Image (spheres, grey):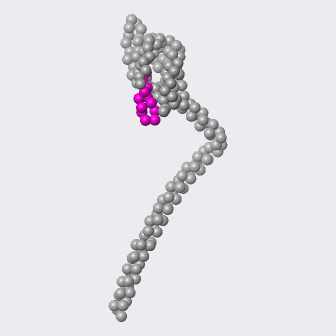
């Protein structure tokens, strides 16, 4: 009789252990995955709700985004046409009083989502006129970066060679 009870207990424990391993544990793993998925979806919903609260008038917000996009398109145009930038350089030179001696473009370099082009611009004028020229370029409608400046005085006139990087999207 003791052996029957011991065998029954051992079979019961083995059945419970097998039931736990093959039935309950997979369900617990599935439940954990569903809980993680639920938490991700809940976070996404919270982001959307916060956005909706921050922007109750969607038409107005879309109009603001269109204005910002148009501004960005001017800063980083999607064409390699440099005519507008050269006009910007000429306008800045006239307004600051420097004389453009030469402009030398280089081939665009692929930088992933944008192309980078360098212009070497040589101008003559006083130090303050040259600074005003660089400031006007920086404040212009197109994004540009003066990466190097070489200056030399020639008979009381400052000649500056500016290496300017400009970018356009592809």
Residue at position x 34%, y 92% in the image = 2
Q: Which residues are magenta?
A: 108-119
* Dominant secondary structure, magenta: strand
Residue at position x 37%, y 12% in the image = 152
Q: Position of residue 67 (x, y in %)?
A: 60, 33
The magenta stretch spans residue 161 = no
- Out of 81 and 130, give the one closest to the viewer: 81
Query: From this viewpoint, is residue 86 visible?
Result: yes
Query: From this viewpoint, is residue 126 visible?
Result: no
Q: Residue 7 sits in which quadrant? A: bottom left
- Out of 131 and 18, give the one closest to the viewer: 18
Above or below residue 78? Residue 91 is above
Above or below residue 101? Residue 85 is below
Q: Residue 21 sits in which quadrant? A: bottom left
Residue at position x 49%, y 62% in the image = 34
Residue farthest along the top direction in this orientation = 155
Above or below residue 67? Residue 137 is above
Residue farthest along the left direction in this orientation = 3
**Quadrant, the N terminus:** bottom left
Q: Position of residue 98 (x, y in %)?
A: 48, 12
* Callout count: 0
- Out of 137 and 19, give the one closest to the viewer: 19
Q: Position of residue 30 (x, y in %)?
A: 47, 65
Residue at position x 50%, y 58% in the image = 37
The magenta stretch spans residue 110 = yes
């Amino acid at each position: 009789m003791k052996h029957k009870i011991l065998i029954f207990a051992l079979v019961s424990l083995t059945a419970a252990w097998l039931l736990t391993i093959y039935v309950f544990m997979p369900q617990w793993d599935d439940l954990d995955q569903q809980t993680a998925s639920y938490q991700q979806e809940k976070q996404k919903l919270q982001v959307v709700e916060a956005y909706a609260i921050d922007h109750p008038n969607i038409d107005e917000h879309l109009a603001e985004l269109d204005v910002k996009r148009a501004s960005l398109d001017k800063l980083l145009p999607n064409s390699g046409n440099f005519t507008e930038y050269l006009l910007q350089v000429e306008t800045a030179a006239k307004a600051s009083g420097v004389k453009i001696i030469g402009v030398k473009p280089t081939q665009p370099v692929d930088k992933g989502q944008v192309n980078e082009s360098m212009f070497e611009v040589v101008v003559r004028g006083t130090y303050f006129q040259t600074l005003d020229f660089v400031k006007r370029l920086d404040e212009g409608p197109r994004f540009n970066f003066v990466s190097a400046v070489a200056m030399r005085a020639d008979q009381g006139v400052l000649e500056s060679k500016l290496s300017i990087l400009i970018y356009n999207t592809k």
